[in-house]
Image (spheres, rainbow, N blue to C red):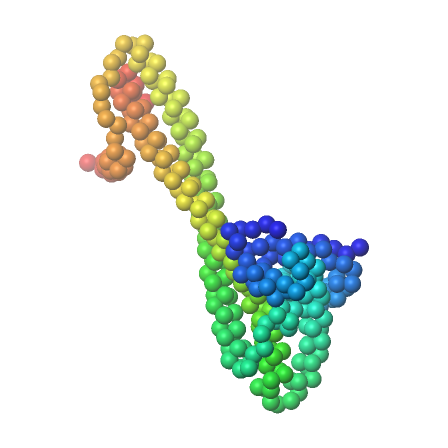
């Protein structure tokens, strides 16, 4: 049955992935990414078990342990880059909305002041104090 | 593939049963959100297969941790700004709606007064409309004058 997932990634990361997976061919980026995802899940599960074995050793800067840490932090950087950029895009869009609303409010306020003045003038002219 | 100024790209991926069977238990075991988990595992796959081999792993790890800290800080600041801007937007939307209602009411009132003035044969002298800032000062003066008891 499978499933469809939408994954957001940073444009610069997509360029890097496409370059790294170019051996799959120009039109095969999606299957290449699915393969990379499968590999990611597979290696992550294996590395979790390896991590448990390696951490019993007191040498915390052994290359194997550092490589596992590098992979994990690299994956978080990959994910965080997209999340950060998405949030910054949302912030920029909201800022534009707020700026537009502020301008609209200022224009409405100017028009209101003008009409209030007009209203006062007309009331005095027709002798309407209220 | 949808793009936002090429900064963030949304990729639809069709996962077959075998891939999903590999991916889903990891995401579930780690307690990740679905989309975030897929992205993390894609990043993990890239770190395994696409990153060039590092000669100085300690230095590479330090650089990645620094980048992650910077990204988290940027995300934190952007999150805060989003929350504040959402509140500002809500407030401004209410103010704009209120101002529109007031404007419609005043427009009706002015139209009515103009008609009465016209029927009474009143000719209004030419006068420049007020400067909004001067009008605000005048309203403040009126307000304080009304507050006086002497």
Residue B132 lies, with reference to residue A46, above or below; the image says above
Residue depicted at x 29% and y 27%:
A117
Q: Is residue A47 in view from this perspective?
A: yes
Nearest the eye: A22 or A128? A22
Is residue A82 at least partly visible in the picture?
no
Q: Is residue A36 left or right of residue B78?
A: right
Q: Is residue B94 above or below residue A38?
A: above
Q: State left or right for residue A120 relative to residue A45.
A: left
- Location of residue A76 in the rendering, given as x and y in whole percent from the top left corner: 58, 68
Asked whether, in this view, residue A24 is left or right of residue A76, the answer is: right
The number of discs equals 0
Residue B2, x across and y down, in percent = 59, 50
Near-viewer residue (A64 or A117): A64
Residue A78 in the image, given as x and y percentages of width and height: 57, 66
Nearer-the-camera pick, B57 or A90: B57
Q: Position of residue A95 (x, y in %)?
A: 44, 49
Residue found 33% across the figure and 16% down from its top = B114
Q: What residue do we see at 67% from left, 80% from top?
A: A51
Residue A124 vertical position relative to residue B51 in the rendered view, above or below:
above
**What residue is drawn where x is 61% and y is 61%?**
A18
Tell me which corner region of the image, top left, top right, bottom left or bottom right, holds residue B101: top left
Q: Quick check: A42 above or below A26?
A: below
Which residue is at the far bottom?
A58
Out of B101 and A110, give the one closest to the viewer. Answer: A110
Q: In the displayed structure, does residue B12 sit left or right of residue B8?
A: right
Which quadrant is home to the C terminus of chain B? top left
């Amino acid at each position: 049955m499978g499933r469809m997932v939408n994954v957001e990634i940073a444009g610069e990361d997509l360029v890097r992935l496409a370059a790294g997976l170019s051996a799959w061919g120009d039109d095969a980026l999606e299957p290449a990414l699915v393969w990379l995802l499968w590999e990611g899940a597979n290696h992550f599960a294996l590395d979790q078990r390896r991590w448990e074995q390696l951490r019993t050793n007191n040498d915390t800067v052994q290359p194997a342990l550092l490589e596992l840490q590098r992979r994990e932090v690299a994956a978080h950087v990959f994910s965080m880059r997209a999340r950060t950029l998405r949030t910054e895009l949302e912030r920029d869009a909201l800022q534009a909305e707020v700026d537009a609303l502020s301008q609209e409010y200022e224009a409405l306020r100017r028009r209101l002041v003008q009409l209030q003045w007009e209203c006062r003038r007309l009331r005095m002219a027709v002798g309407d104090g209220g | 593939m949808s793009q936002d100024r090429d900064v963030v790209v949304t990729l639809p991926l069709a996962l077959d049963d075998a891939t999903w069977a590999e991916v889903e238990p990891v995401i579930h075991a780690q307690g990740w959100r679905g989309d975030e988990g897929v992205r993390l595992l894609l990043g993990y796959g890239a770190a395994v297969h696409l990153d060039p081999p590092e000669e100085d792993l300690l230095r590479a790890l330090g650089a990645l941790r620094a980048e992650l800290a910077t990204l988290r800080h940027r995300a934190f600041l952007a999150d805060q700004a989003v929350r504040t801007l959402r509140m500002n937007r809500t407030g401004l939307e209410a103010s704009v709606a209120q101002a529109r209602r007031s404007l419609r009411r005043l427009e009706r009132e002015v139209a009515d007064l103009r008609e009465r003035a016209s029927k009474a044969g009143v000719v209004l002298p030419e006068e420049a409309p007020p400067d909004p800032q001067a009008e605000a000062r005048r309203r403040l003066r009126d307000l304080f004058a009304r507050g006086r008891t002497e």
